[in-house]
Image (cartoon, rainbow, N blue to C red):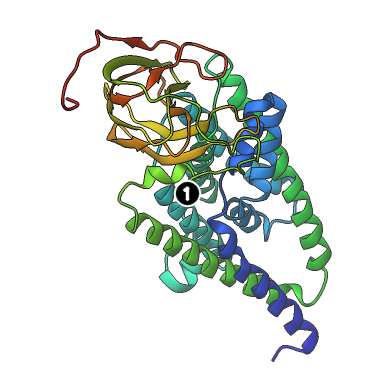
Amino acid sequence: MFSKTKIVPVIFGLLALSLVPQFALAHGMSEADKLAIIEGGNLRYMWLGATHMLSGYDHLLFVFGIIFFLTSFRDIAKYVTAFTVGHSVTLIYATFNGIQLNYFLIDAVIGLSVIYIAFANIDGFRKYLGVNPPNMMMMIIGLGLIHGFGLSTRLQELPLSEDELLLNIISFNVGIELGQITALAAMLVLIAAWRKRDSFRPFSLAANYGLVAAGALLFLMQMHGYSHTSNPEEFAVAAKPTKGVISSAIAKPSTLTPEPSRQDTFSIRIPPRGEKEFKLLMAEGTSMEYAWQTDGGELFYDLHGEPQGDQTGYFETFKKDTSKADQGVVSAPFAGTHGWYWKSNSSSPVMIELTVKGAYQQVDGSKATPVADAKPSTRKKRDSID
């Protein structure tokens, strides 16, 4: 039987581990992070890498499992370095080449990696399976490679510069390592101080069984997310419309006169890992029918409107997704520009053919709403959009 002094840390450890899965799905890039990365430089990538690792509960659980029973600095450095090399290789390679995997599946495998390291810590292979455990060094390198794909998936949610792509990736990876070192130092201080106490042995067993349970729950949560998503890639961006607050300065009746109906076809080039906006000016209450498709590459797009004369940065999203094509009708809720923001993670250019029909005015390549690389074809009057 455990004494009261031994039971308390065991309960504390189990409660702490039970909270981990509640935060697992928050392990991503927020819209605030994306905006900050656009406005910042490589130091911002480094900062986001560090904070991302410190909030990456699945990665931290794995590192915690690696060092749990290691007592010498040499062993700790050896195994942590193996994990670092593994996830750095795939983080850099996958991001640089635009390789994207379903992050529900990647995070599910990362959950299994937490189970593996904890199961090895309790000598589960010999105790429960009657076999010798696989080579720990090779397994940590292999699992590190998988963790790198998870980190790359998150990094590719951000707008990466084609000109400084490698430097962006390296800066983010340096931040990841700094975050890992910070977390590792805290873990080592805690474990070293506790290792000398009688309560460490029961706590260590409870914590590793807790890691198995936490890893299993992480796996089930990610597989649940995967099985309930017909297009998992859409979760790389926020699914809910983004709206600001309309100020009194822009809450005025439309001053635009509705344009006569017209139809145009535009060819729009999205550069490698680039982004583009395309806008049309519409009067309040008018409609525009549209259809667009790419030459094969998938794009994230945000179909939205911006009120005329607004100085607050307000915009209203009508539709947001990741796809190779889309079609529909836009009904202008206010006078102003209405159109698309496209973002590509491909390492090659993507061409879009956009056909629009309705009451609108083409916006010139102004500072506020550029229409770069958009060339209208000969205008035609047709009853429907091909």
Horizontal relation, residue 60 to residue 257: left or right: right
Q: Where's residue 30, x and y in %?
A: 59, 44
**Which secondary structure lies at badge 1?**
loop
Q: Where's residue 191, x and y in %?
A: 77, 62
- The relative height of residue 19 versus residue 181 in the rendered view (above or below) is below
Q: Residue at x 69, y 92 (%)?
A: 1
- The relative height of residue 128 versus residue 342 in the rendered view (above or below) is below
Can I make out residue 173 in this image? no
Q: Residue at x 73, y 84 (%)?
A: 7
Q: Residue at x 54, y 35 (%)?
A: 155
Horizontal relation, residue 338 to residue 186: left or right: left
Residue positioned most to the bottom: 1
- Tell me which corner region of the image, top left, top right, bottom left or bottom right, holds residue 189: bottom right
Callout 1, which amino acid?
Lys
Horizontal relation, residue 381 to residue 193: left or right: left
Front one among 88 and 330: 330
Q: Identify the residue under disc 1.
A: 240
Front one among 222 and 214: 222
Q: Where's residue 319, x and y in %?
A: 40, 41
Q: Residue at x 68, y 24 (%)?
A: 42
Can I make out residue 248 in this image? yes
Q: Where's residue 139, x and y in %?
A: 49, 48
Front one among 266 and 276: 266
For the C terminus, give its image quadrant. top left
